[in-house]
Image: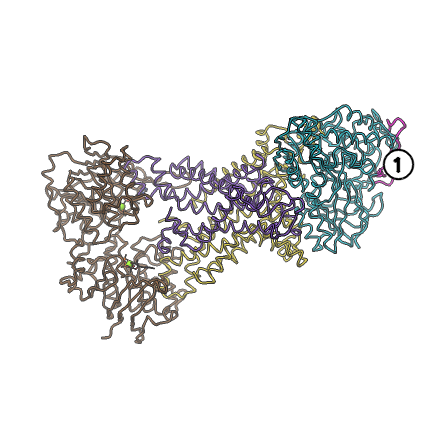
Chain colours: A purple, B brown, C yellow, D cyan
Amino acid sequence: MADLLRGLLRHPSGRIGGAIVALYIIVAVLAHLGVTPYDPIQQFRIDRLKPPSGAHWMGTDMFGRDVLSRLMVGIGQSFLVAFASVGISAVIGTALGLTAAWFGHLWDGVVMRLMDILLAFPAVLLALLIIAVIGPGTGTSVMAIAFVYTPIFTRVVRGPALSIKSRDFVDAARTFGSSRVYILTRHLMLNLVAPLTVQVTLALAWSLLTEAGLSFLGLGTQPPASSLGLMLSESGNLMEMAPWLLVFPGIAIMLGILGFNLLGDALRDILDPKTRSALA
Amino acid sequence: MTPLLSVRDLRVGFGKGDAVKEIVHGVSFDLHPGETLAIVGESGSGKSVTALSINRLIDYGGGRILSGAIALRTRKGEALDLTQTSPQRMEKIRGAEIGMIFQEPMTSLNPVKTIGWQLEEAFRLHRGLSGAAAHKAAIEALERVRIPDAERRLGYYPHQLSGGMLQRVMIAIALATNPRLLIADEPTTALDVSVQAQIMALLAELKRETGTGMIFITHDIGLVAGIADRVLVMQAGDVVEQGPLDQILDAPQHPYTQHLLKAVPHFAGGEAVRHDFRRVDALKQRPALTVDDLTVRFPVTSGLLRRKTGAVHAVESVSFDLMPGETLAIVGESGSGKSTTARALLDLVQPVRGSFEVRGLEGKSQHRPVQMVFQNPYASLNPRLNVESLLAEPVRAGGGRLTSAMRDRMTYLLARVGLPTDSLTRYPHEFSGGQRQRLCIARALMVDPSVLVLDEAVSALDVSVQAKVLELLVDLQKELHLAYLFVSHDMAVVERIAHRIAVVYAGQIVEMGDAAAVLSNPQHSYTRRLIAAVPTIERRRERFELDTRSVPSLVKPIGYEPREASWISYGPDHKARAEELSA
Amino acid sequence: MNYLTRRLVTFPLIMLGVSVLVFVAIRMVPGDAITAMLGTEAGLLTPDQRKALAGYFGIDRSWTAQYWHWLLGALQGDLGLSVTNGKPVLDVILSRFPLTIELALLAVVIALCIGLPLGVFAATRNQKPSDLAVRIFAMLGQSTPSFVIGLLILYILSSVFGILPTMGSAVSLFEDPIGNLKQLILPALTLGFSFTASVTRISRSAMLDVLNDDYVRTARSKGVPALQVIWRHALPNALIPVVTLSGVEFGYLLGGAVLVEKIYALPGLGRLALDAILQRDYALVQGCVLFVALNFMIVNLLVDLAYAALDPRIRLGGR
Amino acid sequence: ATLKMAWSQDATGLDPHKQTAFSSIRLLELIYEPLVRLDPDLKVTPGIATSWTFSPDAKTLTFKLDPKAKFHNGAAVTSADVKASYTRILDQATGAAARANYLSIATIDTPDDQTVVFNLSQPDVPLLSAMSSLNAAIVPASEIAAGKVGTSAIGSGPFKLKTWEPNVKEELVANPDWAGGKTGVDGINISVLPDESAILAALRAKQVDFALLNDPLVATLVPNVPTLKLNRVPVLAYHALQLNPSRKPMTELAVRQAISCAIDRKDVLDTALLGEGKLTGPLTMPDFRSNTDDLFCYKRDLAKAKKLMADAGYKDGFSATVIAATGEPPTAASEAQVIQSQLKEIGIKLEIKLMETSVYVDTWLKGDFDMAVALNGGRADPYPMYNRYFTKAGNLQKVSNYIDDTLDTLMQQGRVETDPKKRKEIFSAFDKHLTEVSPWIWLYTGYSYTAQQQNVQGFVPSPDGSLFSLARVSVK
Ligand SMILES: Nc1ncnc2c1ncn2[C@@H]1O[C@H](COP(=O)(O)OP(=O)(O)OP(=O)(O)O)[C@@H](O)[C@H]1O
Ligand SMILES: Nc1ncnc2c1ncn2[C@@H]1O[C@H](COP(=O)(O)OP(=O)(O)OP(=O)(O)O)[C@@H](O)[C@H]1O
Ligand SMILES: [Mg+2]
Ligand SMILES: [Mg+2]
């Protein structure tokens, strides 16, 4: 863990990506603790659609709410959805991929065909349908995104798991008579951490984008809470009247995705033994 | 006579600017036309870097020639300092004047191009041939390296050929334009003994035919005897000694050269076998391991419904027994079923027939009496676990706890295999290859096994490390009265450790018996062939024979059963399978 | 080809799974074709009226009965009738599909034409400033949501330049190829923007990997000139991951063109599917999803074939 | 010339009797004609019928048809077609949405080809205005018999439907035989541009001559472009916050009134619609519209609201959910947020649930909500507008969940009264009472917007949103 951090600090894109993500997390935590310039849902009637100024650094929206404060909360919300959905899909996907690789045969066939079905299903429509069935909300967005991303994790895990399964140290463990659970958790899982970490950061970037897309369609985060996507969507038809409503959340989301992507790149380099030595 | 190549005080480093790390610290030598210079030295001593510097390929690997001169006399007679030549000029020289062969034939050819294309490219670039002419030249080139059916093989992709074949193709490419200098960087290290012998024979023959100057790089000093005129010994980037072949082999001056010659096992035709065990005495006890009629087959399927169409007869009716304190070596070339036999004994594969019986160590609980040490120490240690977890695993698997007694045993074993005691909290990548293999041995010993299966346990190690690990194994065997099943393809190693030898060929044991008897007086033709292929320092400038026979296919149709073997006895403990005359 | 046949065998299985999934999912969504069509006025219907309409829309029977009916039809190439279009589902889909496939293809072509050379270029300039510039472009490109780019392009074009690609209906490729290209180039650019960025990145890193491979060194030792090493030896190998990415991405583009089609008002399959969901045109939703899934799988199959074409190890099997 | 037109929502079907969506009606009213139609002042004017008379007891209604009226297939429009059309509407098997408005029709007589007599089971003055609905359009009897209504569009209106690609485009060509005269354009090409920003972009780029806009945020940008003209007319449809009086604590009159007093209608309008609208009571038609100052709590009165809450025993407020549809109207989410913030001031914690439109409709019809942000359609006459919600037999009682004797009585009186002055009094009382008992909080009416290039001439907007005057529009 400490090694990882040190590696990140030494890696140029790791530094930038890490800094962005860290900044966002700090902002999110601050917002969660209520440390925002203004109450993010308090409406100030006289302050409607004010451009950025000393009082409101990023201007106000059509309700006279402070955009900066909403942006801070929105980052928190978007990150929450991203982390939760990726967490869920990573856990389920890993479990499925791991067991599919390990048990093979029928179980592998069934799991992978199911994943094929989900993969073949157009992702956006799948998410839309899920949301339409359950009704919109943070929880639903999380579930929908997790659902769409699970097959990808399953695939990402199954491939390496299959190859690790045939590595000598797994054979060695079998000669000792190690239990299945031990082999699965210690030998396979531990060695999947690297590909998984990389995939997780990429998934986080994607999930941020999807959350934005869903909120853009009005099906994600519910107002008056805010998320980056929702802010973008609310700014849609006000773009010409109040461009700051589009610009700031737009930049925020771009930077966030950039942060995760950079972090993913750095982790890929750091966790890959081939490049690790070159960096050290 | 002017030298073909003259290298003076060559220094090579890696890295940019201030961070340059010098790897080769001043190498100088001369090479005359038709002469072969062998560069020997252990892994990482800078042999490859030196070689790559000569044709400036090092530029593409992040390296840089720091100083020195490399003077090459070209075909036209001009002398050229390769360290100063422009990249464009170098492109003309590479291939045309300097050919090169690499260690890994499997990865050194472009996987998506036919070998014909890759061969023709050489002719196109340097001889301006194209179309039918290039095609014809390619066929000739393949025939020159004794590839039968050359015309058809031109359409093959690299993955369709065996390693030995590919290495011949590489040689054909390197020699395509009759370069005046051929650099061969460990061309046989990745190959089987018998294939290695073939390649060596081929190189020697071609050298005689074409009169090319050759730089032959190897870590196996035994190999140079047959081919080199001069030898250059490198250690950690420095040249420690160089001179004519005989002088180096017979009167090495530098301690490192002496060490290389002495410590490294060299095959001695059965003269160096161990004499610390007398089977006759041991026969009163119960064997540690009895294997009877062990047969392993892997189904071969084809078609949509995965219909079984045959089976790989990997191990066929193998029987032997192993006494406590005894080493039985199983030798044979690649794919002959050695590993499969070992794996069957550890329940890693299911035999279709036959049985084996292990004498348990009654009274001791939670043991798995058979333990195994794998070939590649890096691959058999989970890189993400520390040494303590690694050592604890066999105990935990048997239901044991990590008690302080256990910890004591860990420290004891670590010390016993010669590892620092603070190793417990370290991770595998923090150890060298030899240390890792010691770790594997310690791990196998954690549960007090009675039989240790060593599958090519020292093949992946550097020569000098190999010797030390072998020594350790011998000591441990004496101390713990272990029975070893030692799987190897390396005759020199086998000679050092085996009490008895079983030779396997295509899944079957063809000869078995006392080590000295088998090695000094081989009876089966395959055993003889195997022994003939072993390079030794004694066989100086001996001509290797080219032998292109290949192992019969192990894939047999459903229901195929091999004929019952009949054995001929050649001594109290030496028998061989009767051969069919037709072969 | 053994592998291929095995893939073909799982085809119907996956399609069946997709069809069940979409069938159930769309019916679990509250509201049906009647409320979608009549809105709040649906509340004025008497039970008899409602029953009559349910019969008209074919949603009066049990789910299983509906599914069997639909499945039997589908097996004979009849995907049912779209209640909002009054036409067979297949006809509706086929009339919208060419546009989406053209859009996706165009996006892939743009991405490959820009991304591949850029990535290869960057790889040969490893760690130099031009490499850095390419990487920054690629990173930013991957991080920008397509709808943001689309909105920006549209706004700038119309308010600053007063021009716009043709919106609303599709200009036929065959009748007016130039007009068609003019109409689709911007949407394709929007759609393929982040894809271009990822192609750049993948081809750069694949190229870097390949340049380290042994056979590249062999080629150099043969005296192959630097440019030929890159184009003739390295590129064919580096293409393999790029092809995988393109295949996967092309599949997503087919299903994911919804937002771009909405912004540029293009009558493609994505919007058709979205409208069908909103209007609870069950048969049409099923048809669209099945169609997209089928295409996704066909594209995957094509990618496998492309693989085989590129890599003899796959084409000819192991030794 | 051909008029190039754009809108963001398309017709959902071609059967005039089954289509109730605003977007469908806008298309179909250019193709089909009812017996009578409403002019921009909401007066009943001739459609297929040239004249009509109510019998003094208001129990028979007689129409004279225009002898020139012809269907697109060339056949003349006869009384038989009218009878067949109404029979179809009244037949339950048709599933005609507006059937409930015509239930008083007992029998239909056709003395000759040009005369139709409706015999009513009870006096029904609002029937005439109800007949102006497109849902009572006259279709050929032959088409009904052939079961082809809805697949082909054979009407008698100013335009014929040439092609229809749902959600993509439709092409209309002028009907040279139209009884109403010659149309100003040769045809109309309508494109569906689902994003209203894109419509504005298309107008700017002159790709479109004429467009229908829903979102006031987009509409207000039109006047900024010098080449464009915005047409704006107040509409009958009204924005309301529907309370569900069957759910606690909205069962309490005081709570409902408190909500009414706590809501600053003007503020909601100014924020969510950028002020684009007019405060209104339940009745939105100019003839019946009350002065909002006379209605209950139309001036925000927080003190009163708090007191009412305390009286009802909800001094500390309560929690509830409000549902709203995404994009229908486009301002729904904003309205919900302003209302949420206003109600917070009297301690009511609202949770907003945005729903996709069909899900919203489904939930709304089941009455499965605490509160709902709604945009409900208006009618030219108060009775058809509210009888569904606020009469005892109203078939949307399940949605309104509120009825009292006063409302029911006033509605029945309004239905049979033929004297306009007296009707006005009756409905004025209805308006007042309804706002006082506050089952819903009526907010305001918005505008219907159309944007056009300056060279499009002759368009007259109508409060019911009708685009019928496109028949007279010409492009210079
Ligand atoms: N690209 C490189 N960058 C940095 N260091 C390198 C590079 N290539 C080789 N080295 C270092 O140079 C030293 C000599 O390597 P070289 O490959 O010449 O050894 P060798 O004698 O050929 O060994 P082997 O028998 O394993 O092939 C090693 O310590 C290695 O780590
Ligand atoms: N799991 C398996 N499935 C099918 N065939 C197998 C399997 N494992 C081994 N084989 C085949 O069995 C034969 C013997 O293999 P084995 O690994 O025992 O050879 P080996 O003598 O150990 O060779 P090497 O020296 O290369 O390790 C080979 O032909 C191999 O391809
Ligand atoms: Mg080397
Ligand atoms: Mg082996």
Instruction: Confirm whether residue D139 shows in the render.
Output: no
- Total number of numbered labels? 1
Q: From the viewer's perspective, is residue D116 above or below residue B269?
A: above
Q: From the viewer's perspective, is residue D81 above or below residue C194?
A: above
Q: Chain of mark 1?
A: D
In depth, the one of D349 and B50 nearer the eye is: D349
Q: Quadrant of the C terminus of chain D?
A: bottom right
In depth, the one of B404 and D198 nearer the eye is: B404
Name the spot of residue A127 as percent of width and height, x first.
55, 40
Confirm whether the magenta stretch covers residue D56. yes
Instruction: Confirm whether residue C216 shows in the render.
Output: yes
In depth, the one of C302 and D124 nearer the eye is: D124
Tell me the kind of residue under disc 1: Ser
| Secondary structure of the residue carrying numbered label 1 | strand
Confirm whether the magenta stretch covers residue B194. no
What segment carries the magenta color?
Answer: D43-69
Name the spot of residue C318 as percent of width and height, x first.
37, 48
Asked whether mark 1 and ligand 2 are closer than 8 Å, the reply comes as no
Name the spot of residue D454 as percent of width and height, x first.
77, 54
Q: Residue at x 11, y 36 (%)?
A: B283
Q: For the residue carrying disc 1, how many other residues have a C-alpha within 10 Å: few (<14), some (14-19), or many (20+)?
A: some
In screen coordinates, is B7 left or right of D308?
left
In screen coordinates, is C2 left or right of B489?
right
Q: From the viewer's perspective, is residue D139 above or below residue D162?
A: above
Which residue, given by chain and number where applicable, does mark 1 sit on? D51
Name the spot of residue B307 as percent of width and height, x first.
38, 38
In depth, the one of D5 and A224 nearer the eye is: A224
Residue lying at the far right in this picture: please name it.
D56
In screen coordinates, is C4 left or right of B506?
right
